Amino acid sequence: MNLQEKIDLNNLPKHVAVIMDGNGRWAKQKGGARIFGHQNAIAAVRDTVEGAAELGIEYLTLYAFSTENWNRPQYEVNALMELLVSTIRKETATLNKNNIRLQTIGDTESLPKTCRRELLEAMEITAHNSRMTLNVALSYSGRWDLTQAMRQISGLVAAGELQPADINEQLIAEHIATAGMPDPELLIRTSGEMRISNFLLWQLAYTEIYITNLLWPDFRKQHLHEAILSYQSRERRFGKTSEQLTNKSIT
Ligand code: IPE
Ligand code: IPE
Ligand code: MG
């Protein structure tokens, strides 16, 4: 039985989030420049997107560029932006063919104009696709997200449309960038780093975390299957006791 056949399709995460890390180290191991690693990350993205869609995952969120990544050397930032444009251009037809909708989360206003234009076009072309939403986090950080949500909500309060007492978890969830999507049940991070790096801070409150030492350019759908199998072996207690979950008579 291969790994994919072991996956329980009735217990799939609806939303998988991925911190795609380790491109630079992958390139260094091969004696190449960091950009070489970013270029080789595309094959991993393609295979992971395909693998997620094949399984029936509804939302796949990929952390592609963080707010803090703007602080990298200018030539690396430029190369990443160019790679983003050329990848979208090349991959939109495949996304469409596979019935996958492209969306972004993040401060996309801060991206170069050509990137914004390319993204908007790809999002428009794929807008009616329904098999899976591929959500790319670009110029994204969890703190940026919470800040922009607070700004929106305080605007509504100042305009008299909301009272402070109306602010609850649901209202906040409706103003963060992932509004309308379930919180990720599974977070995958490659390259062995055990940190969140300012990713989905609100949304990850009860997410199962899976960390692999693989560097992102080596990640393939079989590794996604491994992560999902690990997720399916976990007991998600949400603060309750194990007995409460297994013995329904204890309330
Ligand atoms: C992840 O790989 C890609 C981005 C953050 C854009 P890195 O570029 O962070 O690679 P490492 O972590 O330096 O190996
Ligand atoms: C996290 O990776 C951001 C992305 C994968 C886009 P980083 O390489 O930027 O994270 P740190 O700096 O190691 O925490
Ligand atoms: Mg990194």
Image (cartoon, rainbow, N blue to C red):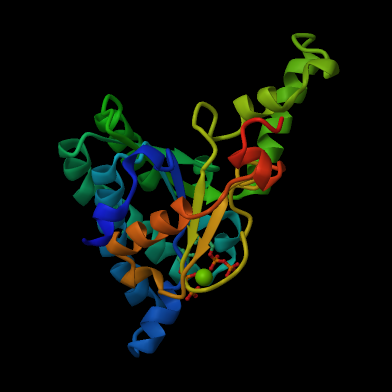
Q: Which image quarter is the N terminus in?
A: bottom left
**Residue drawn at point x = 56 percent, y = 71 percent:** 193
User: Residue pushed farthest top?
Assistant: 161
Q: Is residue 46 visible?
A: no
* Image location (x, y in percent) of residue 115: 37, 47
Position above or below: 111 against 194: above
**Going by the picture, which residue comes out furthest to the bottom?**
31
Depth check, front residue: 95 or 147: 95
Q: Is residue 49 above or below residue 120?
A: below
Q: Nearer the viewer, residue 106 or 61?
A: 61
Q: Residue at x 41, y 77 (%)?
A: 34
Going by the image, does 210 lie left or right of 90? right
- Number of numbered discs: 0
Nearer to us in this view, 82 or 138 = 138
The percent position of residue 237, horizontal first and vertical second, equals 64, 44
Judge left or right: residue 124 versus residue 65: left
- Say left or right for 203 vs 155: left
Side of 81 relative to 91 (left or right): right
Q: Residue at x 62, y 65 (%)?
A: 195
Give the residue drawn at x 55%, y 69%: 72
Q: Nearer the viewer, residue 148 or 176?
A: 176
Percent across and percent down for residue 146 are: 69, 39
Locate the C terminus by quadrant: top right
Is residue 135 shown above or below 195? Answer: above
Residue 156 visible here: yes
